[in-house]
Amino acid sequence: MSELSRRTSQRHSPPLRQNLAVLLIAHFVALSGIAAPVWAESPSASPANDDLPGLYDSFEPKGDIRRFDGETLHYDISFLWFDKAATAAVSFYKLDGQYQALLVAETKGFVGWFTSYRKHVYKSTFDIVDNGERIRSNKFEREVVIGDDVEKTTHSLDYAERKHGWRAFKNGALTDQGTEDIPPDVYFDDILAAFYNFRNSAYGKLAKGATFKINTIPEKGVKEISIFIKTEKEEETVRVQQIRKKTEELLLRVIIPKEIFKTKTGELLFWSSKNYIPLETTVVDYVLLGDLHARFVKRTASKSAPIGLMTLSESAPRQ
């Protein structure tokens, strides 16, 4: 059995005494390797096809990126012998006149109690660029709540001055800060920006065998997200090994800066539907925890900002 097949079909069982951070964000990056549906009649999200998971009633790979407004994708996350040990949701919405994206992930039940009910929140605030077909982050926020402890990092991206600044806090106390230049003709796409831009084919057409390199916010010298779409032959080999039903899907391998999710390699593997909604995701070799697995649950649309915003700011009606 190939390493790729093994990773997407088995779970590890290391000791429980570890940081479960990636569990709370496992599925979000895997989403960054997909293309988008088109809603021809309205920029708001249209209903998904409820009979076939991960499919839309209408679909095109490219369009006005604001068509994602109001969409939330929901996932269950499992690890070790714990099924549905955590939940994750990623949303795109408009608040106070600006487009934003939010990822909220948290443990629940016994696992939540065991891990001090950890909650991770990631939020990006965007400018709309390239004739509405791409988003460019001007702010990226990360907040991790573990019991009574709160860690927060804020990145600001000023493209007029070509400056990237960051500040890190622990329980309200400043622990790190700095600035650096943004190179000419480069955007630093955080993981949420990369998610939606890839869904909208902003980096190029998705095709089996294609490879993409995305400039991202540097983490300990690593400045790229790499996405590899497996060839038809590679995909079929894994499908047969997993005894997976033949459908119109894509198999992707994604490499992110490993420091982001505290993994050994930064590697993620996932199957996406033919409409490029991730259905199953594996986060490979989280330190001391092994592989984490996420499964698509449903897609919803709402006229209100996501409730998870209350961690970073108070929930409010959308404008």
Image (cartoon, grey):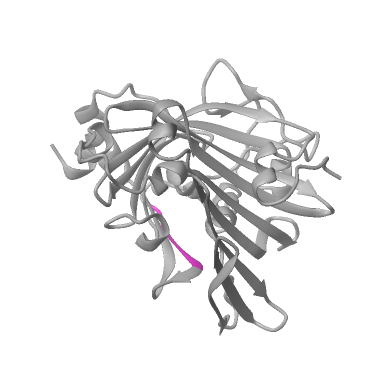
Mostly what secondary structure, the magenta segment? strand
Q: Nearer the viewer, residue 252 or 258?
A: 258
- Please tell me which residue lies in front, 201 or 192: 192
Q: Residue furthest left?
A: 1
In this view, the residue in front, 125 or 43, is 125
Q: Residue furthest top?
A: 51
| Residue 184 falls in image quadrant | bottom right
Tell me the residue at 57%/75% (across/down).
186
Residue range corresponding to the magenta coloring: 210-216
- Residue drawn at the location 74% of the way across and 31% of the way down: 302
Q: Does the rendering let one see residue 52? A: yes
**Left or right side of 230 for 42:** right
Q: Can you give x and y, in whole percent of width and height, for residue 140 in the image? A: 61, 62
Horizontal side of 249 relative to 79 (left or right) equals right
| x and y percentages locating residue 169 in the rendered image | 56, 66
Which residue occupies 70% across, 39% down?
A: 306
Q: Position of residue 193 (x, y in %)?
A: 59, 56
Task: Please indicate whether residue 206 sits to the left or right of residue 231 in the image.
Answer: right
Left or right? Give the position of 66 relative to 240: right
| Quadrant into which the N terminus falls | top left
Residue at the right extreme? 319
Q: Residue 281, position in %: x, y?
A: 39, 38
Please check the rendered image and state whether residue 259 is part of the magenta-colored stretch, yes or no. no
Q: Quadrant of the C terminus?
A: top right
Residue 294 visible in the picture? no
Q: How many marks?
A: 0
Question: Outermost residue toward the front?
Answer: 148
In this rendering, is residue 214 above or below 261?
Answer: below
Residue 159: name its quadrant. Answer: bottom right
Up the image or down, 160 lies above or below 173; here it is below
